[in-house]
Image (spheres, rainbow, N blue to C red):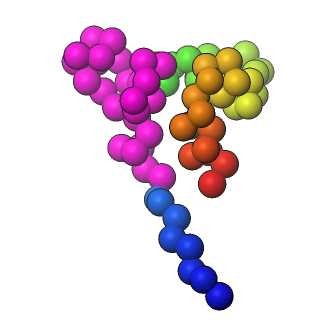
């Protein structure tokens, strides 16, 4: 049986705040998609799948499915 190590998801691996990117607004790492957009989606009843599809976050989609 082969052991498969999985990357541990942490806030640091998913979210970044950089003054050079959108004036320091927290965004998904390697994107310019603010975290607030996800919160807005969820607050209005949209699903995580809708969010991922609309913003085409293939990396996030892969991470969330692990």
Residue 66 spot, x, y in % from top left: 63, 54
Q: Which residues make up the magenta segment?
A: 9-34
Q: Quadrant of the N terminus?
A: bottom right
Q: Give coordinates of residue 41: x percent, y percent.
A: 67, 19
Which residue occupies the extreme top position in the image? Answer: 23
Q: Answer with the quarter of the image where residue 55 lies.
A: top right
Residue pushed farthest bottom?
1
Does 21 appear in magenta?
yes
What residue appears at the point 22 percent right and 18 percent down from the top-left corner? 19
In front here: 42 or 59? 59
Q: Closer to the camera, 56 or 18?
A: 56
Q: Nearer the viewer, residue 4 or 11?
A: 4
Check the image and report above or below for 1 versus 17: below
Image label count: 0
The verdict on residue 15 being magenta is: yes
Q: Is residue 17 left or right of residue 28?
A: left
Q: Residue at x 43, y 50 (%)?
A: 10
Residue 59, image x and y in percent?
54, 37
Above or below 4: residue 45? above
Residue 42 visible to the viewer:
no
As drawn, is 24 to the left or to the right of 51? left
Viewer can see residue 16: yes
Tell me if 17 is positioned left or right of 37 in this view: left
Location of residue 54 by image quarter: top right
Give coordinates of residue 52: x percent, y percent.
66, 28
| Residue furthest left as drawn | 19
* Residue at figure coordinates x 42%, y 18% from the top left: 32
When asked about the image quadrant of residue 44, the answer is: top right
């Amino acid at each position: 049986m082969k052991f498969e190590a999985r990357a541990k998801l942490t806030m640091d691996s998913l979210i970044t705040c950089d003054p050079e990117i959108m004036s320091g607004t927290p965004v998904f790492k390697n994107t310019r998609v603010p975290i607030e957009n996800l919160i807005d989606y969820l607050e209005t009843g949209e699903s995580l799948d809708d969010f991922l599809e609309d913003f085409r976050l293939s990396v996030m989609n892969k991470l969330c499915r692990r």
